[in-house]
Image (cartoon, rainbow, N blue to C red):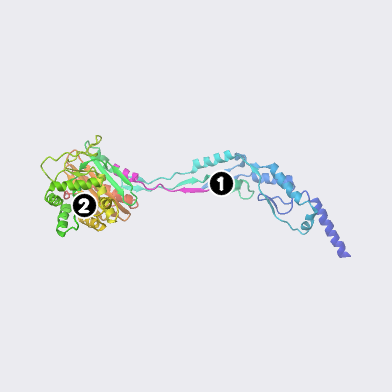
Amino acid sequence: MVAAAVLALVLLGNLIAFATSRDRLPRETYLADIDVSGATINEAINRAQRALQAPVSLRYQTVSLTLSPAQLDFKLNETVARLLLEGVLKRNQGFDQFIPFMLRQATPTRLPPPYQYSESKLQDYLLELAAQYDQPPTPPTADPGTLNLRPGADGLALNLVEARDRLLAALSSGLSRLVDLPVDVAPMTKVGMQALGDLISARVSGFAAVGGNVAGVFVKDLKTGQEFSLNGDVAFSAAGWLKLALVIETYRVAGEVSPELNDRLASVVVEGSSLNANDVLRELGQGDANLGVGALNALLKKLGLVNTFLAQPFDQRTIPPTIITPANSRADVTASPDPAAQSTPVDAGLLLEMLDQCRANSGALLLAFPQQFTASKCEQALALLGRNRLNGLLEAGSGGSPVISRQSWDANNHGVAGLVRSPGGDYIVVVMLHGSSPLNWADTSLIIADIARAAYSFFNNGQAPPAAQPLTAPPPP
């Protein structure tokens, strides 16, 4: 009897408690992440409103900010919240819920946070943050004083889409009111040739400032194909570079280059011997050097090098025939080129590039002359050109890297074209300095070496080799 009475009292007590709590939300009821268990609807709404009007803390990298929800017209949608909460009460008012109530059983109810805000104000706020704190990437810049590149830096960019989602999530939470704003790294602008061009332009500015002086420079990255050209399409006197073309034409014609012919070509390349060069032209022309000149020019034309020609055999005293090219027809700039032998920095550089491509079994030489050039032939030609060692000029500024080059000069023109194989990549450097009066190698050799140093710095992590010593005597012609 006692047990029955106790059970009756327990049931009665729970029944009274259930009946009096029917206007209060059941255990484990959440509006967003705000616990409103046991609250009336009005109490629950007031509790959620207070939580959702608290400021939100933001972090943009190391910058801390505070946002008031009122700035975005953000607030709880009371009408929708009331409807949601009334639905929860209605589901829990039936007497079928008495047993779970008495046993303290509760199924968690998590209601989505009904809110309203101004989308335009939210977007404007994020755009203002981006405008104030985003940082554009900066490319490396030239340091003419050291011929190095000052390092650039990555940029920062607020991810507007993800930031919007994170901010709304924080605004609609009563617990997580801190937002780490998503900031993307905007990669540093890839080092372009412009930075190198700035270095080179600064280095030749003093020379070019002298009336009548012209500096021509061409640099090409053999991996990416990027180029820098300063007066690269200007016609210059270029007898020395035509000897480079002579080697290529000889290798084209020869089925196999004999040791005797190779030695003669070596004399042309290393010593600059015009006598041996004319002997090779006679062999190309089957006894007539002028026919050899025609064969050489035909090669250049077929390769598309329309600004490069030899008008007659080397070192002749006769007046050569006039040859008109796009380069020597320019009215804006002139370097008073020798009518007998002309080229441009770009053409000279492309000749070396074609040989290097051919060595790798590709490029214009194999396309233009598929039966006459092979990778092996081009490798031999490059090895021959590599015997032309110059302690000054490009080699002096290339950090000890192998340099395959051919110089070209006379009293008023000092130049060199080279292929550099550096640790940071292979590249072409061509320089020609034309003076309105005779040039001094002590001055021009330093300009050329410094351009080589700038190029080496560009391709090798921004560190230029030590400054070169000036030439005290001219190189072979």
Residue 213: image tag: none
Of all residues, the one furthest to the left in this rendering is 317
Q: Which quadrant would residue 164 be assigned to in this image?
A: top right
Q: Secondary structure at mark 1?
A: strand
Q: Secondary structure at mark 2?
A: helix
156 in the magenta segment: no
* Residue 45 percent coordinates (x, y): 70, 45
Q: Which residue is mark 2?
A: 248
| The residue stretch that appears in magenta | 181-201
Residue located 83% across and 59% down the image:
10
The one nearer the camera, 77 or 288, is 288
Q: Is residue 1 left or right of residue 344?
A: right
Q: Which residue is mark 1?
A: 58
Identify residue type, mark 2. Answer: Ile
Residue at mark 2 to residue at mark 1: CA–CA distance = 67 Å
Q: Is residue 292 left or right of residue 26?
A: left
Identify residue type, mark 1. Answer: Leu
200 in the magenta segment: yes
Q: Which circle's residue, 2 or 1, is located before the other in the chain?
A: 1
Mark 2 residue crowding within 10 angstroms, few (<14) / some (14–19) / many (20+): many
Of all residues, the one furthest to the right in this rendering is 1
The one nearer the camera, 61 or 160, is 160
* Residue 132 percent coordinates (x, y): 50, 41
* Residue 272 percent coordinates (x, y): 16, 50
Q: Quadrant of the N terminus?
A: bottom right
The one nearer the camera, 46 or 385, is 385
Q: Is residue 255 left or right of residue 172?
A: left
Mark 1 residue crowding within 10 angstroms, few (<14) / some (14–19) / many (20+): some
The one nearer the camera, 306 or 347, is 306
Residue located 69% across and 43% down the image:
80
Q: Is label 2 or label 1 in front?
A: 2
